[in-house]
Image: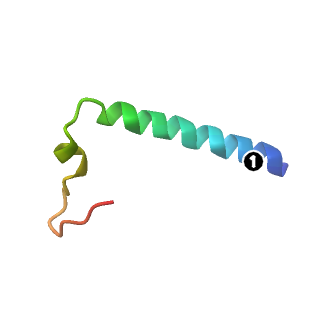
Amino acid sequence: MNDEFSKDNLHGRLRRDREALLWKLDGLSEYDVRRPLTATGTNL
């Protein structure tokens, strides 16, 4: 596996996953997107 293929493959997967995440978040309010869902209040 060459480095260029690996980079392109990883970049493609990251782009696809980012698009999927944005699709899932579409239509949610800013509060719903950011509110912590854990008891400790941890968020990203």
Residue 37 appears at what percent x and percent y?
18, 56
Residue 11 appears at what percent x and percent y?
64, 43
6 to the left or right of 39:
right
Quarter of the figure with the C terminus = bottom left
3 to the left or right of 18:
right
Residue 7 appears at what percent x and percent y?
73, 47
- Identify the residue at the far left of this view: 39
Q: Residue at x 79, y 43 (%)?
A: 5
- Judging depth in this view, the residue of 41 and 29 nearest the camera is 29
Q: Residue at x 19, y 53 (%)?
A: 35
Q: Secondary structure at mark 1?
A: helix
42 to the left or right of 1:
left
- Identify the residue at the far front of this view: 30
- Kindly identify the amino acid type of the residue bearing the numbered disc 1: Ser
- Judging depth in this view, the residue of 25 and 13 nearest the camera is 25
In the rendered view, would you say 6 is above or below 42? above
Q: Which residue is mark 1?
A: 6
Crowd class of label 1 (few under 14; some 14 to 19; many from 20; radius 10 Å): few
